């Protein structure tokens, strides 16, 4: 990026990309249901992953939304190195999440303020892949990182670089060309730098 130019906007998903939502939800479920949470599958939905019934899952979500659990979702292990790399590469880092806007401040707290609340877009639980793509278009984003291939696939037509962080969900599709696929969070800055060198 040339000195004095506008920093490229890069948008990343929060849960299971920057934040370990699985851990917080599993801890909440164990407390609510008073049983050990044993992983049953690689399903995307946590209730399916841990073999919960619909009534059990409803109880967990009721407590999760009613307590301070959104503030206690821990960062993924490599997040602080990732944030430092994003600063070094010189981008404006934004985040997007399918939670209600009332939890925006809690989401920022979970990240220790590394991404301020004003740059966290809370779309609501019913948001679609197309809704995310519209956010990317409005922000004029240069790159996007998500763990769901359907979100990445929706993004490929609106920005130069869409990247799928593969979490090996058994019940999701695959990222389509020209999206990139990475297995580790810290591979993303490498993809960005390669793109910037070519531009």
Image (cartoon, rainbow, N blue to C red):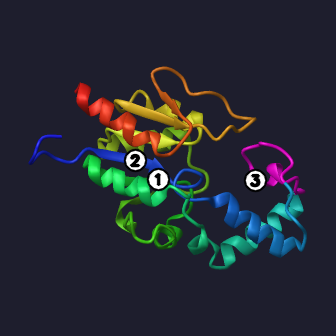
- Mark before the other along the chain sequence, 1 or 2: 2
- Name the residue carrying label 3: 46
Where residue 57 sits, quadrant-wise, is: bottom right
Magenta run includes residue 198: no
Q: Secondary structure at mark 2?
A: strand
Magenta run includes residue 48: yes
Task: Give the main secondary structure of the magenta stretch.
Answer: loop
Q: Is any atom of residue 122 visible in this view?
A: no
Residue furthest to the top: 177
Residue drawn at (43%, 40%) of the image: 188
Residue 112 image point, x, y percent: 44, 71
- Mark before the other along the chain sequence, 3 or 2: 2
| Relative to 64, 84 lies left or right | left
Q: CA distance from mark 3 to mark 1?
A: 20 Å
- Name the residue carrying label 1: 96
- Name the residue carrying label 2: 11
Residue 20 image point, x, y percent: 61, 59
Q: CA distance from mark 3 to mark 2?
A: 24 Å
Q: Quadrant of the N terminus?
A: top left
Where residue 166 sits, quadrant-wise, is: top right
Q: Is any atom of residue 96 visible in this view?
A: yes
Q: Secondary structure at mark 3?
A: helix
Residue furthest to the left: 4
Q: Secondary structure at mark 1?
A: strand
Disc marking residue 43: none
Residue drawn at (89%, 74%) of the image: 34
| Relative to 79, 160 lies left or right | left
Magenta residues, start to end: 39-53
- Mark before the other along the chain sequence, 3 or 1: 3
Residue 39 image point, x, y percent: 83, 52
Whether residues under marks 1 and 2 lie with C-beta atoms below 8 angstroms apart, the answer is yes
Instruction: Name above or below for residue 167 compared with residue 96.
Output: above
């Amino acid at each position: 990026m040339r000195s004095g130019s506008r920093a490229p906007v890069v948008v990343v998903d929060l849960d299971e990309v920057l934040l370990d939502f699985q851990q917080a939800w599993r801890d909440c479920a164990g407390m609510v249901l008073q049983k050990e949470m044993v992983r049953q599958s690689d399903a995307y939905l946590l209730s399916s992953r841990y073999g919960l019934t619909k009534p059990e899952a409803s109880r967990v979500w009721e407590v999760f939304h009613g307590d301070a659990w959104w503030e206690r979702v821990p960062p993924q292990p490599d997040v602080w190195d990732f944030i430092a790399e994003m600063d070094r590469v010189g981008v404006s880092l934004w985040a997007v999440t399918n939670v209600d806007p009332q939890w925006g401040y809690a989401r920022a707290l979970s990240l220790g303020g590394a991404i301020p609340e004003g740059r966290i877009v809370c779309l609501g639980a019913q948001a679609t892949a197309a809704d995310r793509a519209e956010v990317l278009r409005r922000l004029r984003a240069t790159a996007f990182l998500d763990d769901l291939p359907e979100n990445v696939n929706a993004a490929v037509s609106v920005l130069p670089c869409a990247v799928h962080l593969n979490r090996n969900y058994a019940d999701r599709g695959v990222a389509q060309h020209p999206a990139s696929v990475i297995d580790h969070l810290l591979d993303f800055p490498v993809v960005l730098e390669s793109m910037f060198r070519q531009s």
